[in-house]
Structures are given as C-alpha cells and as structure tokens.
Image (cartoon, helix red, strand yellow):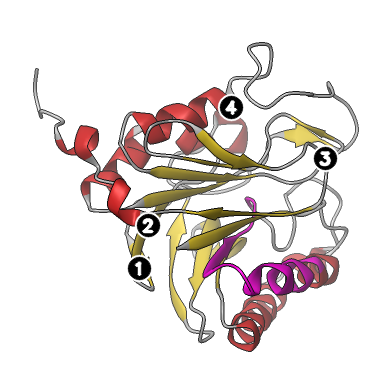
Amino acid sequence: MKIALASPPIPKSIADGLHSLENLVKAAAANAKIICFPESYLPGYPGMGYDKEDRSPQSLQSALDKVCEIAAQNAIAIIVPMDWHHADGLLNLAYVVSERGEVLGFQTKNQLDPSEDTIWIPGNERRVFEVDGLKFGITICHEGFRYPESVRWAARQGAHIVFHPHFAGSDTEGKTLMEWGNKDNPYYEKAMMMRALENTIYFASCNYASRYPESASAVISPEGTCIVHAAYGQAGIIVADIDPSLATGLLAKRLRGQS
C-alpha cells in the first residue's frame, strides 16, 4: 500500500489551510490510499494570531465537512489533525476520514507537554483504525516523541503503522538543518526511528514545512530505517510504498508485563 505525508506551510487562516490541504490531497490521490497532515493543522497551531472566528465550533465543523468532501472527491482517506471543542475545554485530536468522505473517528492527544496544559485538555482513550486493510494508530507530537508506550499500545493491538502528526520548529527563528538524522540534529528524527524499531512496525511522522523545522516528515520501516523523508522547509508530499506483512509487531508483542 502507498501512503502519503503532507508537509504544508503553516496556514495563515483556516481557509488557507483548507486550500493547501485540497491541493496536497489532489497531488497524493493518484498514488496513495491515505494522507496525513501535521498536528493542529485546522484551524492552525495555537498562539499564532489566528482570527477567533476560525477557532469557533461552527468554523471547525464546517472545515471538517469540507475535508470530508475533499476525501470523497479524490477517493483518498485523510488524517486531519484539528483542535476541537469539548465541554471541559479544547482537545487536540486527529480525525480519520475515509475515501468515501465518512468520519471513521478520531484520536485525541492524551499526553500533553507541560507547556500545553493551558492550551488543551488531555484525552483518555486510544483506538486502532483500518483503511483498505491497513491497520493503524495515531500518536500526536509530544506523546509519540517522549511516551513510547503510546506507539507500543497500537502495535500490540495489531497496527501495521502509527501515524505521528507533530509540529517541531519555527517560522521565525532557529537553525537550518541539512541532513536527515544527523547526529547534531534535535533528537526528534532519532525518536522516529526508535518508535518503529522497538515495535517492529512502520512509523510515519508528519511535520510542517516551516522556515526552521527541527524535523522532516518521514516514513520509517519496521527495521528502523528511513524509507523516505521530506526536504527541510519545502512544502509538498512524500509517498512511501509499505508492505503491511512486514509490520509484525514482534518486539511489541514480546513485552512482558513484569520483569
């Protein structure tokens, strides 16, 4: 199966985000069965001066409805990370939309970074999704980088791959990275490799194409090798041909409850 990861620019508004999403989905639809976008893609990552109206429940629902239309029109499943209103606060989650435009469900970000405690509330459930025979989990940013159990849970439930929408970097300041996985890069890309290797599954990590990214979108094999990665700071998609039969989950399933 071929999967795609989108590396869009940081959106200027919810309308701008949807415009980029539609263009990237169209670019992927001929070659991939599913495409994933970065963390909090709609309405846009918090704290960047977005219009309050873009963050209203009505605007978010309208945006999700539009994503469903785009999925159906292009016959491709879409993982679209969003902020979503809840009675207790704002959730950071990722909706899964089928190639027919049906919402299959969502995965919340359950483990927040301390700096995010004033932005979102944590979720408390995990699930595995399935599209065209591909079983997958989702872990969002910080929890996939620092809480490997979020990935292992999905592997132990039979997931062939875990999608990892995240945001690492800045549009205003930072270092310019030159080589994926370089020893002097931030640890993020090394963590991607470990999440695949330690579970014997694929790991698909998806970041924005900011001016100063601290990681690049990449697909990692069950052996922990990088199959394909995006160019730093370059908007577009990457496509990987994966073989679900190689994602045995062997190491994850050998976990002993107590040592």
Between the residue at mark 3 and the residue at mark 2, the CA separation in whole angstroms equals 27 Å
Quarter of the image for the C terminus: give it: top left
Instruction: Tell me, yes or no, whether the two marked residues, 3 and 2, touch with CB atoms within 8 Å.
Output: no
Q: Which residue does the numbered mark 1 point to in the structure image?
A: 130
Q: In the image, what residue type sits under mark 1?
A: Glu
Between the residue at mark 1 and the residue at mark 2, the CA separation in whole angstroms equals 6 Å
Q: Quadrant of residue 248?
A: top left
Highlighted magenta segment, given as a residue range = 20-39
Which secondary structure, mark 4?
Answer: helix
Between the residue at mark 1 and the residue at mark 3, the CA separation in whole angstroms equals 31 Å
Q: Is residue 33 above or below residue 6?
A: below
The residue lying at 32 percent from left, 35 percent from top is 149
Q: Earlier in the sequence, mark 1 or mark 3?
A: 1
Instruction: Tell me, yes or no, whether the two marked residues, 1 and 3, touch with CB atoms within 8 Å.
Output: no
Instruction: Tell me, yes or no, whether the two marked residues, 1 and 2, touch with CB atoms within 8 Å.
Output: yes
Q: Find residue 136 and name its label.
A: 2
Q: In the image, what residue type sits under mark 2?
A: Phe
